[in-house]
Amino acid sequence: MTIQTERPIQTVPRAAQRPAADAAPTAAAAGHRASDDFPEVADPFRRELLAHCYRMTGSVHDAEDLVQETYLRAWRAYHSFEGRSSVRTWLYRIATNVCLTALEGKDRRPLPTGLGQPGSTAGDPLDERGEVPWLEPVPDSMVADPAQAAEARESIRLAFVAALQHLPARQRAVLILRDVLRWRAAEVAEALETTTAAVNSALQRAHAQLEKAKLSRDNVVEPTQDQKEMLDRYVQAFWDKDIDAIVSMLTRDAIWEMPPFAGWYQGAENIGRLIDTQCPGGVRDMRLLATTANGQPAFGLYMRSADGDFVPFHLQVLTLDGPSVDHVVAFFGEGLFDTFGLPDRLVADADNTA
């Protein structure tokens, strides 16, 4: 079942679209080259290649492994690199094919809203699906160069990456190379060892599939001052466990989902009841620590433990709609806080004791 909470937009973010030509250096001349200059030439592209592999796989950890494999293959082949394309383009070709090999026979990584089941009602039993390879969030710090943050954040926003997971792997690769990286069809065909006609056909099918997903408009720019003040109130409302305040900051048709639990919840009042009845914390038991994920505001939620300190509970990634929160994905998972560089414990002090 597809949920549309905002106006449909083009499937690929405008800010991510750029000419295929890039400023990356090409080889000075054809012929053999020593591998000792490979790190200097290739390392500047590590972050954007991680973003590329993340779009392809929907997993930060898989993306890190695949980038390592990409650099290993590139280093081994660097002596024969002839410079007919930029180093950047050459690395993307290797990375794309490494991803396609890794994705063979693998299940896609969904969010609960992508499973095709109807929404849940607060109070329904929670259905944990640990066997599902869920979509993972990615820290902005891992994939976004501060100088190119706006562009990078648009093409890794959570709704876009989730929509990509509905595509077969080769269609996914074609759409990313054509619409995100702005490669020409002939360049994509060469990279994937296929024909230009096959690339154009795959792109057409990919666009049709993403149209069905009704990708919504996500706010991936820096939050406005009003939004920052609202997010401060959001943090305080969880600390106070003020359900009415939390509900007041949600849009009427807001969505809350929390992998690995398969249920998803729509409607501000429904979400409020969920937090009120299913969340184990009480007043002054929940602390939110700000971070960013997928180009969006995010919070690590810490729950008070028996010794009074606060330990990781889940990581919320928020989609904003004007002055309100329109979508929250609360990710549960071991190691998630470490991936985001968040502390593994917050010590209670005089200001946060009951």
Image (cartoon, rainbow, N blue to C red):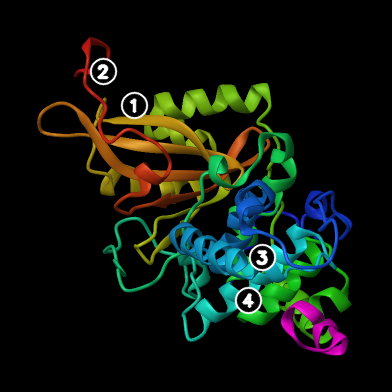
**Amino acid tagged 2:** Asn
Nearest-to-viewer mark from 3 and 2: 3
Q: Mark yes or no: residue 273 visible.
A: no
Which residue is label 1 attached to?
Answer: 239
Mark nearest the camera among 1 and 3 is: 3
- Dot 3: element: helix
Disc nearest the viewer among 1 and 2:
2
The image shows residue 151 at horizontal and vertical percentages of 74, 45
Give the left or right position of residue 293, taking residue 350 as reference.
right
The magenta region covers 190-200
Q: CA distance from mark 3 to mark 2?
A: 55 Å
Cβ atoms under marks 1 and 2 closer than 8 Å = yes
Picture disc at residue 97: 4
Q: Residue flagged by tag 3: what amino acid is it?
A: Tyr
**Do the numbered discs 4 and 3 sit on residues whose CB atoms are within 8 Å?**
no
Q: Residues within 10 Å of mark 2 (few under 14, many from 20)?
A: some
**C-alpha gap between disc 1 and disc 2:** 9 Å
Q: Which residue is mark 2?
A: 352
Query: How far separated are the C-alphas under marks 4 and 3?
Result: 17 Å
Residue at the image position 47 percent from the left and 81 percent from the top: 106
- Per the rendering, the mark at residue 78 is 3
Q: Secondary structure at mark 2?
A: helix
